[in-house]
Image: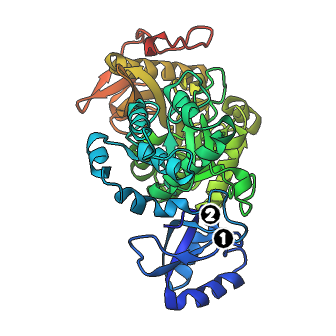
Amino acid sequence: MEFEGDLVKVVFVAKKDAKRVKDWLKVKDGMLSDQHRMCSSTDEQFPDCIAIPVISSHLDMNVHENNDILGGGLQQCPLKSKSSQFGSQSKQYHAELQSKEHTQDIDTRYKFNKIQETLLYVLDSMSIKKIFGAGESETLMLNIDKLCEAECPSKLQFFGDDRTLVLSEKALDYTDETSSFARFLASIVDDQQYDQFMDQVYAKLANDCRSFRIIRRCRIDANSGIRESNFAILWPRQDSIASLPRCGPKSLKWITVTENGIRQSFNLTRVMFCRGNYSEKLRFGTKLVQPDEVVLDMYAGIGYFTLPALVHGKARHVVACEWNDHAAEALRYNLVDNGVQARATVYVGDCRIVAKEQGLVNMFDRVSLGLLPSSEGGWATAVRALKRATGGWLHVHGNVPVKEANSWLEWLCIRVLDCARKEGLVNWVVLGSHLEKVKSFAPTVNHYVADVWLGPASQTVAGAAEMSSGTAAVVVDGRVVILNATVAAPSCALSDEGALCQAWMR
């Protein structure tokens, strides 16, 4: 395996077609990488083939446009410029290791995981320590074996279409001098070599895992009003990839996650991604939103529910509000990338203020309130947004104690009915039709979505015809149960001052 160079996206072609495809890529402006050389394929799916490095954003296009291209992937490709500092010792690593008489004994006694094997590999390739040097072999092996699971995890996590490798907060962290990994690194590597050593570790890990980048999950700033991302990019370094822009959708910071046929791209260092909402996005787009509906997404993010409404639900139009500038940038890009921008309008800012300024009243068939831990502050705005003549649906997200789930739905319906009355909609009814569990948030707390219909009592929607004007009800085992006018507030309700006490979530 060629260890020098960078891990880049490539297309695989038969050797006889390599020159022709390379020439074709040259005339396709911007497709052929000018930083790396083509080389023999190391991918088992494409043996005896040539890997041609391409600009990452054009990989899918390349595969589909030229029949000579057999497929695409990630591979280490040599740089066109001067080769890397540490030479090619690592290419002979396995052969040298197998030549040692006691290799089998070491493999039997030490069950190294992928990260531990990588540390051993890079130490040898950089000649920092001789793995089988006099008296040092056992100490080195033992120290690697002693690295704790948190700092040297055996289970690796991947994220995104390019299999970005995600490390936990403590994994391979040498900045905390009290950690066992920092002490291990200090015992074998000079301070000046830390970054170089870790770059080689990351490069080897990425190559073996077929990952385009490696990121670290850090702590979330509890005081951040927009809950920015907690990811930091560890590898590759921006200055090592001259072909990628420093910002924008084609930069190293942006990642794409495809779900249910929808591409969602965003800046992973500034925007959080909700990975647990997969089934709810699908339900919203394929079962709830109906063709020709007008939908309001009050907390749109990068388009978690806006995109399914447009792509799968075939909504006539979606108005999406988002107050995080970075998420709004991604949302606009994703609308274009999925070809639905003509049926969407994006507003940046607090949805309650935007609704007043833009007159988002009496316009919508359906409103999504996908804010956690509570969207209670936006319920009145959502009610005002629904069409007066027909009413509509609210899909209200919230983190709720499991034991209070049913009472939360009842209380929600009473509160929404009160919002309608304050708007003069005294003939409206509210029906809690369904409560959907999205995922577990904590041992005793779940993320739920309540499907709530409200509108004139004359409308015949899911049991609402059985109700009298000005009443609220929930559906229990297929029966409509009328609620009392007063329902005790659950522990996850906002205070009178509009604050959320989160002690119940701990």
Q: Is residue 209 left or right of residue 265?
A: left
Q: Say what secondary structure mark 2 lies in.
A: loop
- The Cα–Cα distance between marks 2 and 1, rounded to whole angstroms, is 8 Å
Q: How crowded is mark 1: few (under 14 residues within 10 Å), some or many (20 or more)?
A: many
Question: Of the residues shown, which amino acid type is indicated by label 2?
Answer: Gly
Q: In which quarter of the image is residue 44?
A: bottom left
Which disc number belongs to residue 36? 1
Which disc number belongs to residue 493? none
- Name the residue tied to disc 2: 5
Question: Of the residues shown, which amino acid type is indicated by label 1?
Answer: His
Residue that appears at 71% across and 51% down: 238
Q: Contact (CB < 8 A) between labels 2 and 1? A: yes
Asked whether 73 or 401 is in front, the reply is 73
Residue 345 seen by the camera = no
Q: Position of residue 26 (x, y in %)?
A: 69, 82
Q: Quadrant of the C terminus?
A: top left
Q: Say what secondary structure mark 1 lies in.
A: loop
Q: In which quarter of the image is residue 380?
A: top right
